[in-house]
Image: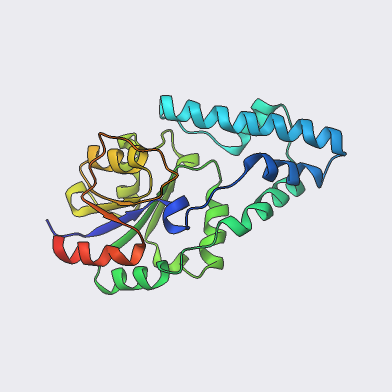
Amino acid sequence: MAVRAVIFDWGGTLTPWHGIDLGELWLAVCARHYPAAEAAAMATAVQAAEVELWRDGEQSQRSWTLDHIFERAGITASADFLSSYFEAWDPHTFTDPDVPPLLHELRRRGIKVGVLSNTMWPRSAHEKIFVRDQVFELIDGAVYSSEIDWVKPHPEAFRAAMQAIGETDPAACVFVGDRPYDDIHGAKSAGMRAVLISNSDVPPYQAAAPDAIITRLSELLSHLDRWS
């Protein structure tokens, strides 16, 4: 079947993959608002809560949010604290340079563009990034796990992404992501084609069988040509 929609993962896919030290990031945020000793204890607690919730999500495939992290860590996050948190993430969120020309070309071909991200962030944080990087208007619909009950690889997450872009047939969709389990296994289980953008730091999953493997997003178009 011809491709009518391409749905992208966000982190490590639409943004280039690189390692991030969560402990240092949380400490830098907390240190802007609390004395050193209190900031260190708070950073340790909130990082532990985040890691625990990521692990819980992997096992249960249930979603969670920033509020769940703060609740588990036993802290109250003010608006200023949240502003500092997202500011600390800014250098790690820039959209891959391949994305704008790729999305423009998909739009030229009449192929819908979607985003499906496992994320604790609210929609507003992601949309602010897409607006900043001038790609927001090129996205037809997006689903963030912070707004639904499930995370990838649960099939309901993929069905929600299809619904967001007005597509009903998974066979007409291609999913692009960097995680063999969440993205490739999840998309294939939902009936989609799946393209792996390979990142060496992402854990493998032997049962995942991508329809194509790419090293940069600009390589996607040749596979779409083949499938169409």
1 sits left or right of 81 in the view? left
Find residue 33 and report its horizontal and vertical position in percent. 82, 44
- Relative vertical location of residue 92 with respect to residue 98 in this rendering, above or below: above
Quadrant of the rendering where the C terminus is positioned? bottom left
Q: Is residue 228 visible?
A: no
Which residue sits at x=56%, y=45%?
A: 121
Find residue 41 and report its horizontal and vertical position in percent. 78, 30
54 sits left or right of 112 in the view? right
Along the viewing direction, whichever of 24 and 49 lies nearer the viewer: 24
The coloring applied to the image is rainbow
Which residue sits at x=68%, y=52%?
A: 88
Which residue sits at x=45%, y=52%?
A: 12
Which residue sits at x=29%, y=43%?
A: 184
Find residue 55 and report its horizontal and vertical position in percent. 49, 28
Find residue 190 and report its horizontal and vertical position in percent. 24, 39
Along the viewing direction, whichever of 47 and 170 lies nearer the viewer: 47
Quadrant of the rendering where the N terminus is positioned? bottom left
- Relative vertical location of residue 220 with respect to residue 35 in this rendering, above or below: below
Instruction: Report the label total.
Output: 0
147 sits left or right of 128 in the view? left
Q: Is residue 213 visible?
A: yes
- From this viewpoint, which residue is outermost toward the left? 1
- Relative vertical location of residue 8 with respect to residue 119 in this rendering, above or below: below
- From this viewpoint, which residue is outermost toward the front? 200
